[in-house]
Image (cartoon, rainbow, N blue to C red):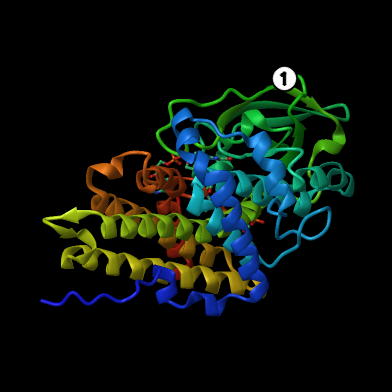
Amino acid sequence: MTSRTTPPLAPLELFAVDRLIGEEERDIQATVRALVAERVRPHLAEWFEAGHVPVRELAPELGRLGLLGMHLQGYGCAGTSATAYGLACLELEAGDSGVRSLVSVQGSLAMFAIWRWGSEEQKQQWLPRMAAGEAIGCFGLTEPDFGSDPGGMRTRAVRDGDDWVLTGTKMWITNGSVSDVAVVWAQTDEGIRGFVVPTDTPGFSAPEIGRKLSLRASITSELVLDGVRLPADAVLPEVRGLKGPLSCLNEARFGIVFGAVGAARDCLEASIAYAQERDIFERPLAGYQLTQAKLADMTLELGKAMLLALHLGRLKDEDALRPEQISLGKLNNVREAIAIARECRTILGAAGITLEHPVMRHANNLESVLTYEGTSEVHQLIIGQALTGRPAFR
Ligand code: TGC
Ligand code: FAD
């Protein structure tokens, strides 16, 4: 019997992924990791248990590091590479999917919609404050009866003189009740259009959705638009049709491709650390072949997910990333992350069901991540259409 041990390697170290990441991107990643360690991780169990996250306090700190609208150019945004943005999402989600979601919705959905499709006045009015985390944004696409099929939305904007009047309900909206501005998508006589809605406009309310078992360190709300009257210049002038909101989803889904790797990495690292310390039948759990088979298989999937994320990041940096390729990454990486989280939970035994360890919190969060930004089935159908040329959504 041998007792020889070798110094352990971290799972992604084994893949030597650092060699694929430039120095500046590595620095950004390390900075976000440090922020998460100092400012987020110590509070996560408490936030998750309370079903609350201090968005107003956290956002300016995220803004100071340039994480809000991070890969956008101008208007106070950091203008980093897409890969750097992805790596930031990875580190944020290694903390908690809810914190990554806060950043995704602010930067990739609300800010991106204004940045890509807004007027110069809308950009000047909102983007610098949103980049600084002084103004919070949300993105209202989903409705109670239209999630996967947003084209069916019933929220309607009608002209009244020069004004627009919005009526309808949006559902499952991240940051809704803490937002200063909502980007709301609505049917009009000219097709689907986007509106920039200050949340203090009469007729707007955002009741919070409670009793969630997932993404508890994130705020989720309804948006109720009860005859919300907006001036003519509230509409996003540069886009009509579903491609407006779908173009924003591309950005947020890209961040999730990386983010899911972060959640999975955190689970794997936590369960390896636990297995090293936990004695079972008088020796460490980490030394058993069954445990090592689990760890090896999970490391393979984690590393493949990371390599896929980095490949998609490079494609995006070359402006060559197609939406179907983002679907490959979102489908694979979230599906594998949730499988890893569940397998890691088994290694922790009973201790794994508590908030003393991050694993089941990640597993529960990943249930939302699997569903939002296009369910697994929607991404299978997008990939199926790419492979066959036949849309099978309907
Ligand atoms: P379809 O007929 O295929 O397309 C309508 C128009 O949109 C264009 N298009 C896209 N444009 C940009 N990017 C994309 N990815 C696009 N996909 C399609 C398309 O070319 C067409 O343009 P045009 O000019 O010809 O009109 O649309 P469809 O009605 O068949 O729906 C397709 C489907 C099912 C793939 C799509 O609707 C879909 O993705 N459904 C899922 C909805 C979803 O993901 N919702 C997410 C809401 S936001 C959220 O969840 C935030 S969670 C918090 C967080 O992110 O952290
Ligand atoms: P449904 O569309 O009703 O789907 C139910 C099931 O049917 C799923 O399994 C789905 O895959 C399947 N299905 C759908 N179409 C097909 C098909 N053609 N063939 C076979 N099966 C199919 N939305 C926003 O707009 N903004 C936000 O900020 C936001 N934040 C969210 C935060 C959280 C925590 C959550 C959970 C959701 C959030 N969403 C947000 C909503 C999210 O995008 C939707 O939940 C998602 O798009 C799925 O819609 P749905 O829940 O209505 O499910």
Relative placement, left or right, of 141 versus 75 is: left
Quarter of the image for residue 277 reads bottom left
The residue that appears at 42% across and 56% down in the rendered structure is 266
Horizontal and vertical percent for residue 170?
Answer: 59, 31
Relative placement, left or right, of 294 versus 161 is: left
230, above or below 359, in the image: above
Horizontal and vertical percent for residue 281?
Answer: 11, 56
Horizontal and vertical percent for residue 300?
Answer: 34, 71
Horizontal and vertical percent for residue 206?
Answer: 63, 25
What's under tag 1, amino acid-wise?
A: Gly
Q: Nearer the viewer, residue 238 or 254?
A: 254
Relative placement, left or right, of 369 versus 194 is: left
The residue that appears at 46% across and 78% down in the rendered structure is 16
Screen quadrant of the N terminus:
bottom left
The residue that appears at 70% across and 50% down in the rendered structure is 68
The residue under label 1 is 203
Answer yes or no: is residue 386 visible. Answer: yes
165, above or below 175, in the image: above
Q: Nearer the viewer, residue 134 or 382?
A: 134
The residue that appears at 71% across and 38% down in the rendered structure is 136
